[in-house]
Image: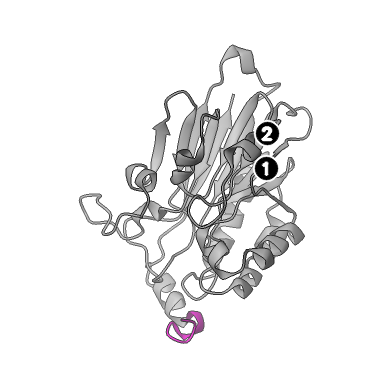
Amino acid sequence: MNTLLMNGWVAGLSYRLGGQGSLGVSRHEVVLGPERRLPRPLTIAFASDFHAGPTTHPAVFDALLEALRRERPDVLLLGGDYISFDAANIRGLQGFLQAARAPLGTYAVLGNHDVWNGSAEIAAALAAGGAEVLVNRNLPLPAPFGAVSICGIDDPWTGAPSADATFDGAGAVRIYLMHSPDGLWCLQGQRFDLGFAGHTHGGQVVRSNGEPLKRPSGPYSRAYCHGRFEIAANGPLFVSRGIGCAGIPLRVRADPELVICTLR
């Protein structure tokens, strides 16, 4: 595939012609109930679906880094699919990972492309870049947010997800980090206050009427393709369009997106 895409030359041409979109920042606010009061507002950044490799021009990652420096989030969450085609492409994200660290930490889950192409190598590179890789486990944030747990589950379809392990011992405020909205299918009665997912790319190529040319697979991914969704008995779920391009080096009416959420 690297050869077919001329080792990124096609992605470079697409980027120069505007075919990889322009990074946008979507801002949201979530207010917790009085029983889950925080010491101060917590700003969370979420980015997903980087797809480093021949389908995504590296300038997209530079734009994301600039946006993160402007937004100055407390926490950075990463939603998986860091590469396309080859685990070695994670090297294209090394500089970003080193530079994008947030004060209260960077937390990551893996996506289907990571599982398919070598999750051990990708997880090791994420850890070397300062990210906590959460595969069916959770971690509390540093003080003064020790009651907030980041709960990361394995990819719903290509991994081995376990909600019981993911939420075991989690704090009063639970942030559910998943690659795909189909992580909702894996909940098995567990509760979350705020959820983040990617995978869908918002359709990546979208018709003028807003309908994706091809909807993603998975029942929740099809239903929750992009935006904010209120999940019964839980908190809201935010589904991002992601950062890079999968399959083909092209985005149409589905610009890359950094999600910023302030939790109060």
180 to 246, vertically: above or below: above
Residue 65 position within the rendered picture, expressed as x and y whole percent measured from the top left: 61, 56
As drawn, is 94 to the left or to the right of 52? right
Crowding at mark 1 (Cα within 10 Å: few <14, some 14-19, many 20+): many
Q: Amino acid at mark 2?
A: Asp
Q: Which residues are magenta?
A: 1-8
Residue 208 occupies which quadrant of the picture? bottom left
Secondary structure of residue under mark 1: strand
Residue 21 position within the rendered picture, expressed as x and y whole percent measured from the top left: 40, 61
Looking at the image, which is closer to me, 85 or 188? 188
Distance between the alpha carbons at the discs numbered 2 and 1 = 7 Å
Quadrant including the C terminus: top right
Kindly identify the residue that appears in the image at 43 percent across and 70 percent down: 15
Query: Magenta includes 138?
Result: no
Crowding at mark 2 (Cα within 10 Å: few <14, some 14-19, many 20+): some
Looking at the image, which is closer to me, 240 or 174? 174
As drawn, is 78 to the left or to the right of 40? left
109 to 176, vertically: above or below: below
Kindly identify the residue that appears in the image at 40 percent across and 73 percent down: 14
Kindly identify the residue that appears in the image at 59 percent across and 55 percent down: 110
- Numbered badge on residue 137: 1
Q: Amino acid at mark 1?
A: Arg
Residue under numbered circle 2: 168
Residue 137 position within the rendered picture, expressed as x and y whole percent measured from the top left: 67, 42
Residue contact between numbered discs 2 and 1, judged by CB atoms under 8 Å? yes
Kindly identify the residue that appears in the image at 33 percent across and 42 percent down: 223
Label 2 or label 1, whichever comes before in sequence order: 1
Secondary structure of residue under mark 2: loop
Q: Residue furthest right?
A: 143
